[in-house]
Image (cartoon, rainbow, N blue to C red):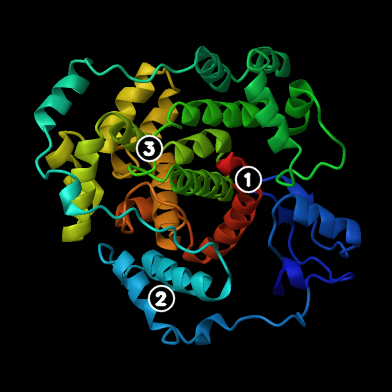
Amino acid sequence: MTTVHLDEIKQEMVLSEDVIDVTGRLLLQKGHKIKPSHVNIIKKWGITEVNVVGDSTGEEIDHDNVDFQGDEEIDHETLNLFQHTDLDHPATKELYRLAILFKKYRNIPEMDSKTTHNESETHHNPPKKDIRKKISQKDLKMPEIPSIVLELNEILSNPLSTADNLAQVVSKSPSLTAVLLRIVNSSYYGFTSRIDTITRAVTMIGTREISSLALVICTISVFKHIPRETLDMHAFLRHSFTCGLISRMMAANRNIRETEQLFVSGLLHDIGRLVVYSYFPQAAKSLLIHCQNTERMLLDEETRFLGYTHTDISRFLLQEWNFPSQIEDSIFYHHDPMASNDPIQATIVHLSDIVVNALGIGSSGERYVPPLNHDAWENLGLSPSSFEVIIRQAIHQLSVLEPFLQS
């Protein structure tokens, strides 16, 4: 058996294993001889490699003999990113290897530049007591969520929701309908005929999938006016969407049915930071400057500067917006997954965040790779060898979604 990358697949190769998409759907059975139509199916669903019988004639990189000393700048940069992690742990060690490998050989997007602040821009002692008081006493008026989000949350929580239920809700917003149809008709899904109604889109993709996309689009749009000098919103969205994609793929890998909920959890895992950037920009700058100068992680210093962590603020916001409790729980505990009511789902978001920070795709403001919770890793039961395929699929899907992140 040989693993063959998409670019190296040839006709008449015989599949030695079933080809499964990220949702667990069977695309092609093992034993099939690959035809041109099969290659199209593989491309449409974001599969980047398949297992075939016999040897591959395609030229591959010898991962075990890659000269990691060939580019000292990348080596130094990556080591700096991982300074808060345990590089002796098998999972972290594999992510470190892949971070270097992908930056050198796989042409993933270059690490987004982290916003650098001058010390003169702000003070170092933000009024955290005022922030704590405003949040705890609910004096802070949270952004008003569009009423459509409340309806979408109900649909996402109700397993009996129908395509008509969703279509009626989405149709209330022509702009949301237009964005959803653009995504559905993009190469991300790869349908050969045009889909021109939400009802048809739901029939083809599923109620929960469309609900999740709509929910994410509406939620993120609330924060679209954050000044660039405070946060590069495009970089934030790239980080968030990749986290959502990887969360969904890991869920499929573990045969978890709620892949759409994990997509939403992964995408919104740092939404509390958007609240900080929006409502407390001076405190945010002070925190970022401090972490920039001391090489500390944002998570470790947030309570000192804000009175809360971003996960505390995320929970408050999601409760105000009546998000499903499973999504709220996964987001609140994504840095402490074993304390969650569902450690597996919280660990998937935890690990996805680590992977995306390791690759340097986008940024939520954090400059370093968060440490891996070893107990959560053991409980998840994922193999480090699965990282590479998941990362390849996520990068492929992100490249398709990129135009929508910039609009």
In the foreground, 330 or 239: 239
Residue wearing tag 1: 403
- 8 sits to left or right of 141: right
Element at badge 2? Answer: helix
- 159 sits to left or right of 278: right
- 324 sits to left or right of 252: left
Mark on residue 227? 3
Whether pointer 2 and pointer 1 mark residues with C-beta atoms closer than 8 Å, the reply is no
Residue wearing tag 2: 74
Rendered position, 81 above or below 130: below
Element at badge 1? Answer: helix
- 229 sits to left or right of 40: left
Give the mark toward the camera: 2 or 1. Answer: 1
- Residue 311, how many percent across, how many down? 29, 36
- Residue 147, how many percent across, how many down? 50, 12
Mark 1 and mark 3: Cα distance apart in space: 21 Å
- Please state which amino acid type lies under the numbered disc 3: Pro
Rendered position, 69 above or below 265: below
Earlier residue among tags 2 and 1? 2
Mark 2 and mark 3: Cα distance apart in space: 30 Å
Residues packed near mark 2 inside 10 Å, few (<14), some (14 to 19) or many (20 plus): some
Can see residue 207? yes
Mark on residue 72? none
Residues packed near mark 3 inside 10 Å, few (<14), some (14 to 19) or many (20 plus): few
Q: Residue at x 60, y 20 (%)?
A: 159
- Please state which amino acid type lies under the numbered disc 1: Pro
Q: Residue at x 69, y 53 (%)?
A: 46
Can see residue 257? no
